[in-house]
Structures are given as structure tokens and as C-alpha cells.
């Protein structure tokens, strides 16, 4: 072969490899592991409904189904993780004891129906949870727009006895460009970005499960057992081996248990809901009678479950499913507990217990007493604000010792979230509440810059409340919120109001109301002679009445924590005003202009009486026009 021909061959090979790399995701792992295990792959039923919701070039809602893409990609990748992957419905039959991998590393065996001599070595369950697209197309035109697709999945691996030996939650993002034209409403390229995100996610799941220590330990044991079995077979089985092969195996019950939280988060807290999904199968030839499920272990957590649970009888070759629920109990310090789940029956051998270790963190103790503003007034008539969205953020606890705690901030956000639903009429599915360690910078970005664009409809309203500490740039006066994990002198981890304003300017909303109970940090580096805080938006899209900000302070003032009211001083009067205190004309509706005037007067007066200094709220811009001033916020009757 000539040198020129060889060169062309190499170029063609590299090009083909690049195309394969792009197909599976630029940052993914396309290699194979081929652990010597046979694994049954199960997808949660909700995967079938997974779809990305976005608006086309004409503003019409669209949905791109991604469930089938995820099933295909995850099945393919798990075929690279294990020697043999089967799906539910595989029939018993002979199975090879060893396999050789194809040259170049092809996928392992993936079987939808076949014959296995024994149950699989493990079961892998996959649930596609998070699926969002960040895409904003302002009008129909021939143009390209950036699109970001974020997908997340939860994975649980069970061994042959049904013990959950590995769990993982994973989130990945893919970015690309979609195209529109001025002839129709179609958006081209969404499926390409979605496919890349799903591909990267599937490869990540493969890598994590194939490199998990306990899964690899099981694979090593399986390989050793195969070698022992092969050696025994080569010697010929007689005597004792023959007796063992013909012995009658007693009927037993098998069960699996999966632990999950309703919040679907890694770190649990006091008050979080906890559930155990149990699947019991009778593999014997007779009815299993009088089955009982028991929860034991650490008393403080085990006592939260109803136990014992009488399950009754289970027919041969049938499966029963049950779910046990509890609430994480309070504790003075971060707690760890052991849960033991056992299954008993009157006429069947009991399977091994399932053991779980649960860790949870206490919510920082707050001296928060129940006050009148915490409850929604009786008889309040809700608005029907189906197109409105609400975000309530409260950050009072910080990782950094240099940032002082705000006693009521998280509580402020929780109660404001209730007001959004109970008095402002926002559907609960369109409200997000972030507090303390769940208000990292990434959390703020996700909600404000990813969730809001998908949730806000054309002509809708946006209500945002933030109670937190903030810093002011000594050079520009720009105000930035301090997320839970941030240092005040680390601009990379701060979240600026300018960034928030940029996000709001991109929304197809009618109006946004931004309520800021911000405590400005004293002694910020370079604070000598620093400028007054800059609150106003620079974006032309937010001028006029499009954005109204109700600010807790006017300048370098202290935003007080009001023990008597159980909230920040500004938030206390916000809540009191929204529940009727600001209804100056007594018409049962609290309007924007009424709330601005009421809060300013009450906070200014109370700060002077209780704290002997000034705290003067302001509305920016002042709702001078009749239209803005009359915007209804809450309805009381």
C-alpha cells in the first residue's frame, strides 16, 4: 500500500472516531468494563413520560420525549459495563460460565428474552428525574439560539439477595445551538442537544456503577466462583457433588428494599419524608402464609415507621409490593441511625435482613416563635394566578465563620412561600423555596436561570423574595447576595443582583415584583468611602413598571432581625401588610402601592422605637402610575 493511501486511511479512521465520540458525548466515557456479572436492567415507569418542555419560535409550548432515548442509551452503556445485561421477562435457561470480549471492545450481551440458568447476579434500577432545557426564542426569525439541556438520573444497584449496595444521583449538561427560520415556528436541533445530554448522562452512570467498590467486589467474587465451578466440572462430579445437585431446595421468600426520600436529595434533614419501597417474591411451590414485615434498628428512627406490618399470604410465583413511610426525627446534633428490615412467614424460610445506614443533619436551632403572621388568614379568597410563578430564598446559615448567621432568614422564606400560594394564588407547582444549605450558588442559578425561563409564560407575573446577607462592590456599588457556601470576598461564588436582573430581562413576563430583605455586610474589604448600593436595573427591558423592587433598606443601614415578630423586621411588615395591614381602602385587596407605603412607614417607625436607628425601606421605582400602584398582590376576601 502506498504512503498516500495509508495517510488517507489514517485520516478516515480518525474522522470516524471523532464522529463516534460526538455521538456518545464529548466529555463522556465510551470505554468498556465488562464486569463478569449478569445484571437485570429495570427502568422506573416514569421514564416513559420524560420530556423536555420548551416554547417554539411562535411561543407555543412543545415537548420533546427523551424517555426512549434514555432507555436506549443507558441499555447500550450498561452493555459495556457488564458481561450480560437482561431486561424483565428473560426466561430461565443455560448461561455461559465465561465470555470473551470482541476485539476492539464491543458491547456486552444485551438480552430482552433468552434463557438463564439462575437469577441474575444483580438488579440495576434507573429513574430519570431532572430534565430541563434552557432555551429562549423571543420571536420568529432566521437565527441560531443557544440551548442548554440538563438531565439527571438516580441509580440503585441491588445484589442477588436484594441488598442495595450502591446508589448514585447524577446530573449532566449539554450545550448547543438550535436554529429557527422566518417561515414557520419550527426549532431545529433540540433533539441533537438532548441526545448529547442523554448520552453523556448514560456514560456517566456506566462509569460510576462499573467502578463502584462494592460492585467490583461482587464481580471479583463471581469470577472466582466461576473458576471454582469450572474446575469442579472438569474433574467430574460424583458422590457428595451428586447428592448436592439432587437435594431439594427449601422454598424461600426473596425481597428487595429501596430507600428513598421524597425530596430526592443526598443530604436529609429533620422533617424530611423517608420511604422504603419493598418488593417481595414467593419463589416456592406453595403459598407463603402469614407474612410479616418488621422494622428495627436505632430506636429514634425505627420508631417513626409503623411496625410490624402484616402482609397476609402470597401465592407461589407471585410478587407483592409495599411502601413504608416515616419522617426524619429531630436531633440535637447530626445523627446516624441503622435500619433493619426483616420478613417473616409461617411456612417459609426468612430471607436475610436488609440493612440501611441513614445520616441526617439538624436544621440550625432557631428561636422562632409562632406569631400571627405565620398563618394564612381564615377565609382568605385566593387569586387564580395560574400564569404566575414565585421564588422564595432565605439564607441564614453559612459555611464561613466570617459570615454571621441571620436568625430568621430561612423561616422568612418558608412563610413567604406559603403566602405566595395561600394569598397570592400561585399554584404550588410553580413555587420554589430555597433555604440555607440548599441555597448554594448553583441552586440559585438553577432556579433563576434554568427553571424560571421554562416556567414563566408570556404575560405572566414573577414574584421573588430574598432574605440573606449581601455585599456591595466598593468601586461600582453593585449588590451581590452571599450564597450558603460563599465567602464575602470571593466574587466567583457570589450572586449579583445584576445577574438576577439579566435573567428577568430575558423572560416574556408582564411584570416582576422583587422583595429584598438584605443585610449588608459591614467592613467589606475596600469599604472605606465605598459607594451607595446600586439597586436599579440597567436593562432597558425592565424600565418603567416592568420590574418593581421593594427594598428593606435604602442605603448603608442595618436590616434588623425582629425577635418580637419572629422574622426579619422588613419581612415581618411585608407579611403583615400582605395579610391585610396594608389594605388602606378596606376593599379586601392589598395593592402594590398600598404595600410600599405601609411597609416604609411601619419599618421606619419600629426601627426607631425598638433599635434607636434608621431602617427605611423603599420601592424602586416608586409605583407612581395608577396602573402600577393598583396592581393587586393579595386578596383577603
Image (cartoon, rainbow, N blue to C red):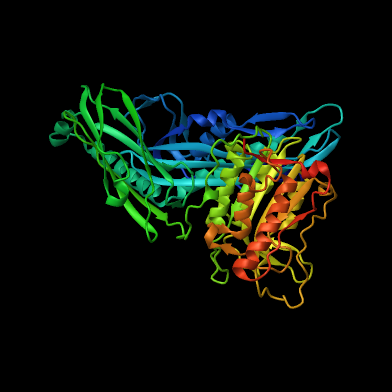
Quarter of the image with the C terminus in it: top right
Q: Which residue is nearer to you in this view: 22 or 171?
A: 171
Q: Residue at x 69, y 38 (%)?
A: 587
Residue 416 placement, left or right of 217: right
- Towards the viewer: 88 or 561: 561
Residue 408 place in picture, x, y as percent: 54, 59
Would residue 272 be found to the left or right of residue 236 on screen?
Answer: right
Residue 73: image quadrant is: top right
Name which quarter of the figure residue 509 lies in: top right
Determine the residue located farthest toward the bottom in the rendered image.
Answer: 528
Q: What number of labels is visible? A: 0
**Residue 99 versus residue 489 in the image, above or below:** above
Front residue (pair 11, 363): 363
The x and y percentages for residue 163 are: 33, 42
Judge left or right: residue 4 versus residue 34: right
Residue 198 found in image quarter: top right
Which residue is pictured at 49% across the width and 47% down the height?
A: 265
Instruction: Give the image location of residue 398, x and y in percent.
Output: 55, 63
Between 55 and 249, the one nearer to me in the picture: 55
Visible residue check, residue 252: no
Image position, residue 82 (x, y; %): 45, 40
Mark yes or no: residue 144 visible.
yes
Q: In which quarter of the image is the N terminus?
A: top right
Amino acid at each position: 500500500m502506498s504512503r498516500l493511501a495509508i495517510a488517507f486511511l489514517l485520516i478516515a479512521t480518525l474522522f470516524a472516531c471523532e464522529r463516534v465520540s460526538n455521538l456518545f458525548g464529548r466529555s463522556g466515557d465510551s470505554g468498556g468494563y465488562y464486569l463478569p456479572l449478569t445484571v437485570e436492567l429495570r427502568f422506573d415507569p416514569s421514564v416513559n413520560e420524560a420530556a423536555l418542555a420548551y416554547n417554539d419560535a411562535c411561543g407555543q409550548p412543545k415537548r420533546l420525549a427523551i424517555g426512549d432515548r434514555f432507555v436506549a442509551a443507558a441499555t447500550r452503556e450498561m452493555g459495556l459495563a457488564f458481561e450480560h445485561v437482561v431486561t424483565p421477562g428473560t426466561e430461565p435457561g443455560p448461561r455461559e460460565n465465561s465470555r470473551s470480549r470482541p476485539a476492539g471492545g464491543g458491547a456486552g450481551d444485551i438480552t430482552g428474552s433468552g434463557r438463564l440458568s439462575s437469577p441474575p447476579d444483580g438488579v440495576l434500577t434507573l429513574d430519570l428525574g431532572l430534565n430541563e432545557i434552557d432555551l429562549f426564542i423571543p420571536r420568529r426569525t432566521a437565527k441560531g439560539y443557544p440551548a442548554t439541556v440538563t438531565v439527571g438520573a438516580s441509580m440503585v444497584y441491588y445484589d442477588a439477595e436484594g441488598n442495595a449496595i450502591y446508589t448514585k444521583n447524577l446530573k449532566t449538561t449539554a450545550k448547543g445551538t438550535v436554529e429557527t427560520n422566518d417561515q414557520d415556528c419550527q426549532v431545529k436541533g433540540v433533539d441533537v442537544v438532548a441526545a448529547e445530554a442523554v448520552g453523556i448522562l448514560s456514560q456517566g452512570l456506566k462509569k460510576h456503577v462499573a467502578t463502584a467498590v462494592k460492585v467490583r467486589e461482587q464481580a471479583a467474587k463471581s469470577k472466582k466462583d466461576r473458576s471454582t465451578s469450572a474446575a469442579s466440572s472438569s474433574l467430574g462430579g460424583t458422590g457428595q457433588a451428586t447428592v448436592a445437585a439432587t437435594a431439594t431446595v427449601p422454598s424461600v421468600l426473596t425481597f428487595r428494599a429501596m430507600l428513598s426520600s421524597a425530596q430526592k436529595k443526598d443530604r436529609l434533614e429533620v422533617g424530611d419524608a423517608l420511604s422504603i419501597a419493598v418488593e417481595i417474591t414467593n419463589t416456592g411451590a406453595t403459598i407463603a402464609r402469614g407474612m410479616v414485615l418488621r422494622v428495627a434498628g436505632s430506636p429514634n428512627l425505627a420508631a417513626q415507621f409503623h411496625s410490624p406490618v402484616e402482609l397476609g399470604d402470597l401465592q407461589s410465583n407471585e410478587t407483592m409490593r409495599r411502601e413504608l413511610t416515616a419522617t426524619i426525627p429531630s436531633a440535637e446534633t447530626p445523627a446516624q441511625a441503622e435500619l433493619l428490615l426483616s420478613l417473616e412467614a409461617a411456612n417459609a424460610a426468612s430471607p436475610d435482613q436488609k440493612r440501611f445506614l441513614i445520616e441526617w443533619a439538624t436544621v440550625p436551632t432557631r428561636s422562632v416563635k409562632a406569631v400571627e403572621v405565620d398563618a394564612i388568614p381564615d377565609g382568605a379568597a385566593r387569586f387564580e394566578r395560574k400564569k404566575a410563578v414565585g421564588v422564595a430564598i432565605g439564607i441564614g446559615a453559612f459555611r464561613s465563620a466570617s459570615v454571621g448567621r441571620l436568625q430568621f432568614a430561612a423561616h422568612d422564606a418558608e412563610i413567604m412561600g406559603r403566602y405566595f400560594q395561600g394569598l397570592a394564588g400561585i399554584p404550588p407547582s410553580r413555587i420554589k423555596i430555597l433555604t440555607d444549605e440548599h441555597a448554594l450558588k448553583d441552586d440559585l442559578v438553577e432556579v433563576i436561570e434554568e427553571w424560571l425561563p421554562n416556567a414563566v409564560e408570556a404575560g405572566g407575573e414573577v414574584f421573588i423574595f430574598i432574605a440573606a446577607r449581601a455585599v456591595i462592590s466598593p468601586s461600582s456599588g453593585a449588590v451581590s447576595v452571599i450564597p450558603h457556601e460563599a465567602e464575602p470576598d470571593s466574587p466567583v461564588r457570589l450572586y449579583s443582583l445584576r445577574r438576577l436582573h439579566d435573567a428577568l430581562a430575558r423572560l416574556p413576563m408582564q411584570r416582576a415584583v422583587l422583595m429584598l430583605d438584605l443585610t449588608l455586610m459591614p467592613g467589606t474589604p475596600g469599604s472605606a468611602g465605598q459607594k451607595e448600593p446600586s439597586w436599579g436595573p440597567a436593562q432597558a427591558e425592565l424600565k418603567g413598571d416592568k420590574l418593581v423592587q421593594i427594598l428593606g433598606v435604602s442605603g448603608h443601614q442595618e436590616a434588623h432581625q425582629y425577635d418580637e415578630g419572629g422574622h426579619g423586621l422588613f419581612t415581618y411588615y411585608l407579611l403583615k401588610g400582605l395579610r391585610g395591614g396594608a389594605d388602606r381602602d378596606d376593599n379586601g385587596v392589598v395593592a402594590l402601592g398600598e404595600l410600599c407605603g405601609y411597609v416604609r412607614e411601619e419599618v421606619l417607625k419600629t426601627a426607631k422605637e425598638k433599635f434607636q436607628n434608621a431602617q427605611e425601606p423603599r420601592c424602586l421605582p416608586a409605583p407612581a402610575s395608577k396602573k402600577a400602584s393598583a396592581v393587586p398582590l393579595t386578596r383577603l376576601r
